[in-house]
Amino acid sequence: MSERYGIIVSKPGYDATTATAISGLAIHDQIQLLKIKSTAKITLPADATTAIPHGLGYIPVAWVFIKTASNDLHPVYYNTSRPYAYVDETNLEIANSYSGERDFYYYIFYDKISK
């Protein structure tokens, strides 16, 4: 790499001072990374909804996953007929439309959703 200043962290087996491909780097200050504001696991009873305040004043990137009965994690999207997640300028809303209790894992990022 050319001589320059910044933050570069290489992956195991690579040298940050000589790496020529981004794929050999874990962190590079010229690559956009999502910045986590909060993350947690919540358990919702059947047919329950919860609002998690984020206090950002804008619509942030948010990821929500549900733990299935077979212990797999699946992403939750916005739709009102299944478990869903919805984020606005104030809250992340998560709903469990299953007939049983389910665990949800969420991540709220500082990054804004661009329209």
Image (cartoon, helix red, strand yellow):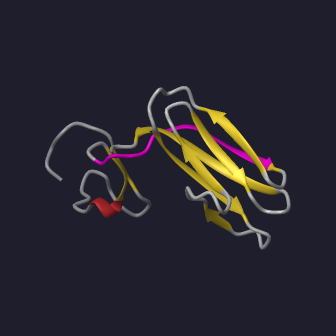
Residue at x 41% of width, y 58% of height: 11
Viewed as shown, does residue 99 lie left or right of 14?
Answer: right
Q: Residue 42 appears at what percent x and percent y?
A: 75, 46
Q: Position of residue 105 (x, y in %)?
A: 67, 51
Q: Main secondary structure of the magenta part?
A: strand
Magenta highlight on residue 54: no
- The residue positioned 40% from the left and 64% from the top of the image is 13
Q: State whether residue 53 is above or below residue 17.
A: above
Residue 44 vs residue 57: left or right? right
Residue 41 in the magenta stretch? The answer is: yes
Q: Give 114 or 63, whichever is nearer the viewer.
A: 114
Task: Give the camera-side residue of 6 and 50.
Answer: 50
Q: Range of the magenta residues? A: 31-43
- At which x and y percent is residue 115? 33, 44
In the rendered view, tell whether residue 5 sits above or below residue 55.
below
What is the number of callouts on the image? 0
- State the image coordinates of residue 55 (x, y, percent, origin top left): 55, 26
| Residue furthest out toward the front | 81
Residue at the image point whose x is 57% and y is 47% from the top: 86
